[in-house]
């Protein structure tokens, strides 16, 4: 396959929709994809920009529905395909064009489809109907023949952080509310739990397929991967609209029960448990602050806020995953690796201001609309350049024709000697015209006849000039030529006069047309 950016079909979907190998021209499941853009060549920074673009884009939801057929124009067989409806695909194409528009092959536009086979023109369609079947594209890929590089979507969109939640009850609980429905205020900012986010949380939990282990003091995220004993397991998650997200089917280990159980001092005085709080680690979208996933829930002993809150910060330092996110941000913003939060926030604010200024200047409501406007302006600029070139070429042809006419007139009136003709050969026609208006007659009729009568200037190319001489045109042909293409008419007339013909009648007619 030539160099192209594609959306490979997820393996399980590709295996399901691929045609049997017995179908002539059928493509293997591993080759099924949607072409986003074909490239003429690879710019030096292509891999880096694709990785960053994909990392900050969400997986693309799409639907396969219906079949179709592209007739071959190169003898390679008809492309039999599945239609693809992917609303966010156009925005992805816009973003790619914004980065690498000079390298996009514009032979074909964006027509989302998945080619299943290349069929002979008279072969029947292998299937009549298909779908609808929903799917999610999880990665953007660069395919260059057999070399295929994938860039997962959303790898930089989720940010992991750790939060303290409600205090543990006196007895080992079977379930705990981790977040209340709606906005949850913490010392790390506000986090949103809503139906869409909860659906993603539950999807990720089910996809993992095992119980979620708990840990102590977020040991899972400690530098070097240090882990402590496991205090328990979370068997399920349950979203209750209007209430919140619950960890359910809790199972405690012996070490976990000891850690949360109250004890007694030697004198019999009751003591508090060693661990009294739970703190979930979460994945969230840094732009919307929506909670997207639950990672290990930790037993912690030291909340970072004063007083009882449904959800408060852990006082421990930021986990390694959050540090990695900050490093990613500094790299993407072009900042020094040791930039502090204030510098990063200032850079983000500046980028937002630049974005808003650009959107305002283009009259666009969002980035896709702005990219559409930029592409339209670029196309208009390219067309304007072509029109300007055509105008300049036409002006040059008209100027040459007018000069030839004036030279013929000057000779006819005895006002141009060979030396003067050479002098005005490169002068503007307007300057030669002004000269002839006031120039005296310097040649006698006999001298005028002795002047060489050159053919029309070499290189003069005006569309529409008749092949036969002006004198051989009928009156009707001359009239039609004048009405349809005056420049061609005047060039033909000038050639007629240069050859010694009399054009006085037609010059008088042209003067009347010009109001002179």
Image (cartoon, grey):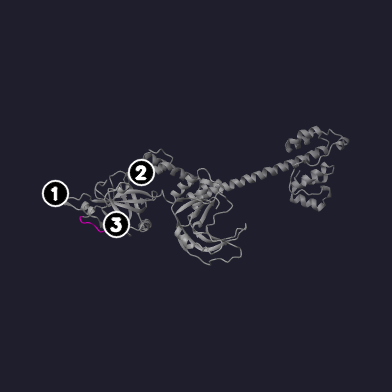
Location of residue 318 with respect to 427 vertically, above or below: below
**Image location of residue 481, percent across then percent down:** 77, 50
Q: Does the magenta segment cover residue 176? A: yes
Q: Considering only order in the chain, which callout, 1 or 3, is on the residue closer to the N terminus?
A: 3
Query: Whole-Å distance between the Cαs marked 3 and 1?
Result: 31 Å
**Dot 3 corresponds to which residue?**
234
Query: Which residue appears at 11% of the width and 49% of the height?
Result: 267
Residue 323: give its label.
2
**Quick check: marks 1 and 2 in contact, CB under 8 Å?**
no
Q: CA distance from mark 3 to mark 2?
A: 27 Å
> Magenta part of the protein: which range?
170-180
Q: Is residue 179 visible?
A: no
Q: Are marks 3 and 2 in contact (CB under 8 Å)?
A: no
Question: Was residue 263 drawn as part of the magenta stretch in this picture?
Answer: no
Crowd rating for badge 1 (residues with CA inside 10 Å; few <14, some 14–19, many 20+): few
Residue 137: x and y in percent read 46, 56
Q: Nearer the viewer, residue 421 or 66?
A: 66
Q: Which residue matches tag 1?
A: 265
Q: Is residue 213 left or right of residue 9?
A: left
Q: Nearer the viewer, residue 378 or 404?
A: 378
Q: Is residue 436 left or right of residue 16?
A: right
Residue 221 visible in rendering: yes
Q: How many marks?
A: 3
| Residue 335 drawn at (x, y percent) | 42, 39
The span from disc 1 to disc 2 (Cα, nearest Å) is 41 Å
Where disc 3 sits, the SS reads strand
């Amino acid at each position: 396959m030539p160099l192209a950016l594609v959306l490979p079909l997820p393996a399980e979907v590709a295996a399901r929709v691929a045609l049997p190998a017995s179908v002539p021209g059928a493509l293997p499941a591993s080759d099924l994809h949607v072409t986003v853009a074909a490239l003429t060549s690879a710019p030096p920074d292509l891999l880096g920009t694709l990785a960053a673009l994909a990392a900050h884009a969400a997986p693309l939801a799409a639907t396969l529905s219906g079949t179709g057929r592209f007739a071959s124009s190169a003898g390679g067989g008809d492309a039999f395909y599945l239609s693809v409806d992917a609303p966010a695909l156009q925005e992805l194409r816009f973003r790619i064009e914004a980065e690498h528009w000079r390298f996009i092959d514009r032979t074909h536009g964006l027509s989302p489809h998945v080619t299943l086979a290349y069929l002979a023109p008279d072969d029947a369609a292998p299937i009549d109907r298909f779908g609808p079947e929903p799917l999610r594209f999880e990665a953007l890929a660069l395919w260059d023949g057999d070399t295929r590089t994938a860039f997962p979507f959303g790898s930089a969109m989720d940010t992991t952080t750790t939060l303290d939640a409600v205090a543990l009850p006196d007895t080992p609980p079977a379930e705990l509310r981790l977040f209340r429905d709606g906005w949850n205020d913490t010392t790390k900012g506000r986090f949103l739990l809503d139906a869409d986010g909860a659906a993603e949380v539950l999807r990720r939990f089910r996809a993992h397929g095992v119980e979620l282990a708990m840990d102590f003091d977020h040991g899972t995220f400690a530098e070097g991967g240090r882990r402590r004993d496991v205090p328990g397991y979370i068997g399920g998650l349950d979203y209750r609209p209007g209430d919140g997200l619950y960890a359910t089917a809790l199972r405690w280990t012996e070490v976990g029960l000891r850690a949360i159980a109250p004890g007694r001092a030697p004198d019999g005085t009751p003591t508090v448990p060693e661990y009294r709080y739970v703190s979930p680690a979460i994945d969230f979208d840094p732009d919307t602050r929506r909670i997207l996933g639950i990672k290990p829930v930790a037993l912690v002993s030291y909340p970072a806020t004063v007083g009882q809150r449904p959800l408060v910060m852990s006082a421990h330092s930021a986990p390694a995953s959050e540090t990695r996110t900050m490093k990613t941000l500094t790299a993407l913003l072009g900042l020094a690796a040791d930039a502090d939060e204030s510098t990063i926030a200032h850079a983000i604010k500046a980028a937002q201001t630049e974005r808003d200024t650009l959107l305002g200047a283009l009259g666009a409501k969002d980035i896709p609309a702005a990219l559409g406007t930029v592409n339209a302006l670029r196309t208009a600029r390219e067309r304007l350049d072509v029109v300007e070139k055509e105008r300049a070429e036409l002006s040059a042809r008209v100027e040459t024709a007018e000069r030839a006419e004036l030279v013929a007139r000057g000779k006819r009136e005895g006002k141009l000697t060979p030396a003067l003709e050479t002098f005005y050969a490169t002068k503007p026609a307007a300057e030669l015209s002004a000269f002839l208006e006031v120039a005296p007659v310097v040649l006698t009729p006999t001298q005028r006849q002795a002047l060489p009568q050159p053919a029309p200037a070499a290189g003069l190319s005006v569309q529409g000039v008749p092949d036969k001489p002006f004198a051989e045109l009928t009156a009707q042909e001359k009239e039609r030529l004048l009405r349809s293409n005056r420049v061609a008419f005047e060039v033909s007339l000038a050639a007629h006069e240069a050859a010694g013909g009399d054009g006085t009648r037609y010059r008088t007619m042209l003067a009347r047309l010009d109001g002179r």
